[in-house]
Image (cartoon, rainbow, N blue to C red):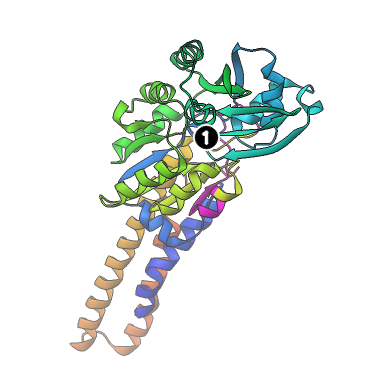
């Protein structure tokens, strides 16, 4: 019966993809599941992926007069840190006119606020914008906030770095356990983030990830380069939510976008995790890392079902053909036995354990 052989793969894939969709995991095609079934390198973005995406402005050091100006400029950006900046400023920033705003993805934004040159971004962006090293006092503020586990953002006014804002974002409650689960399944988990390297290493340490696998201060181009370097060694998965993750996600063996992702990330991804993490504690609810662990586990389970279906189909056909050729099986009996193989493959595919653990959202 060739039907069983023909059904073995697409039927198992269809059931798995349908069950995943009901659990809030949208998979673009069966080839994505096949690629996820082989453990390799798994890179995680930090903000909104490892962390809850509930970014808050926690500290301010320096020129108080620059705060409203910086918030007005950040209103031109969709970055999570920018949204937190604007939320903390309230209605003051909305009264200031912004012109010539230019955003450098993953680095910062510059422009004119009330006809005054302003730039807000990473230390590297501030140095490039001002053309000089950070003043000792500003560099000290950056180090102080980073050592406290906050993400430092430098504010430049009239070509000088004058203030530093510190942002905090709690690590998801399921992150450490999920990283442990992924590592036990054979994945090499690391962090790729544009955030300050000290903050990234601190988050990695909390999750049990070695410092060498925690890469901070990484530009979108550097993220892409890191993924491409790992591709020579096998499967590479990139999990993220921002525009600065899109190129790396597109280049990876499989790109995974979480809930709340930018449109560019969604377009580049092979999988979109839309289910909210029940323990996230926020309405944005970028899917918890436990969903990523379920995804790779479901992919492995689906491939196991396909192999089981193929082994059964081949064994059944070889046995049946041999008995038929030798005359042991009467043609009428063979006609009755033929559909049994297809029914068995259907039953095997429907009984897969893939994506059974999470209830439908």
| Residue nearest the observer in this picture, 274 or 64 | 64
**Magenta stretch contains residue 19:** no
Above or below 231: residue 70 = above
| Residue nearest the observer in this picture, 317 or 62 | 62
> Image quarter for residue 226?
top left
Q: Bounds of the magenta span?
A: 265-283
Question: Is residue 210 in sight in this rendering?
Answer: no
Q: Residue furthest left?
A: 326
SS under mark 1: loop
| Residue nearest the observer in this picture, 189 or 313 | 189
Say which quadrant the C terminus sits in. Answer: top right
**Magenta stretch contains residue 276:** yes
Above or below 218: residue 342 = below
Question: Is residue 9 in sight in this rendering?
Answer: yes
For the point 52% across and 34% down, which residue is it? 107
Q: Horizontal placement of 198 versus 49: left or right?
A: left
The secondary structure that most of the magenta stretch takes on is loop
Residue 129 percent coordinates (x, y)? 54, 30
**Residue bearing mark 1:** 107
Say which quadrant the N terminus sits in. Answer: bottom left
Residue 319 percent coordinates (x, y)? 22, 76
Residue 342 percent coordinates (x, y)? 40, 72
Above or below 160: residue 21 = below
């Amino acid at each position: 019966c060739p039907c069983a052989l023909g059904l073995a793969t697409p039927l198992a894939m269809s059931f798995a993809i349908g069950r995943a969709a009901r659990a809030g995991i949208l998979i673009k095609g069966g080839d994505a599941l096949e690629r996820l079934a082989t453990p390799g390198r798994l890179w995680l973005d930090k903000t909104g992926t490892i962390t809850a995406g509930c970014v808050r402005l926690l500290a301010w050091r320096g020129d108080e007069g620059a705060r409203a100006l910086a918030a007005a400029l950040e209103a031109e950006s969709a970055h999570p840190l920018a949204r937190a900046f604007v939320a903390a400023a309230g209605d003051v920033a909305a009264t200031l006119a912004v012109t010539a705003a230019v955003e450098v993805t993953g680095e910062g934004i510059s422009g004119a606020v009330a006809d005054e040159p302003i730039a807000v971004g990473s230390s590297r962006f501030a140095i490039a914008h001002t053309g000089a090293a950070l003043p000792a006092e500003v560099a000290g503020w950056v180090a102080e906030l980073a050592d406290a586990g906050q993400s430092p953002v430098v504010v430049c006014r009239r070509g000088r770095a004058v203030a530093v804002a510190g942002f905090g974002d709690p690590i998801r409650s399921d992150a450490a356990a999920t990283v442990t689960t992924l590592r036990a399944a054979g994945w090499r988990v690391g962090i790729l983030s544009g955030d300050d390297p000290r903050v990234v290493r601190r988050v990695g340490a909390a999750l049990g990830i070695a410092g060498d696998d925690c890469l901070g201060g990484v530009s979108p181009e550097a993220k892409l380069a890191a993924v491409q370097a790992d591709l020579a060694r096998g499967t590479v998965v990139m999990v993220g939510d921002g525009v600065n993750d899109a190129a790396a996600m597109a280049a990876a063996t499989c790109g995974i976008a979480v809930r709340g992702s930018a449109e560019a990330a969604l377009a580049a991804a092979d999988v979109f995790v839309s289910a909210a993490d029940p323990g996230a504690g926020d309405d944005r609810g970028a899917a918890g890392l436990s969903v990523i662990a379920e995804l790779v586990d479901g992919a492995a389970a689906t491939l196991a079902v396909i192999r089981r279906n193929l082994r059964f189909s081949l064994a059944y056909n070889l046995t049946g053909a041999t008995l038929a050729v030798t005359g042991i099986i009467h043609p009428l009996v063979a006609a009755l036995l033929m559909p049994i193989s297809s029914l068995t493959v259907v039953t095997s595919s429907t009984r897969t354990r893939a994506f059974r653990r999470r209830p439908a959202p």
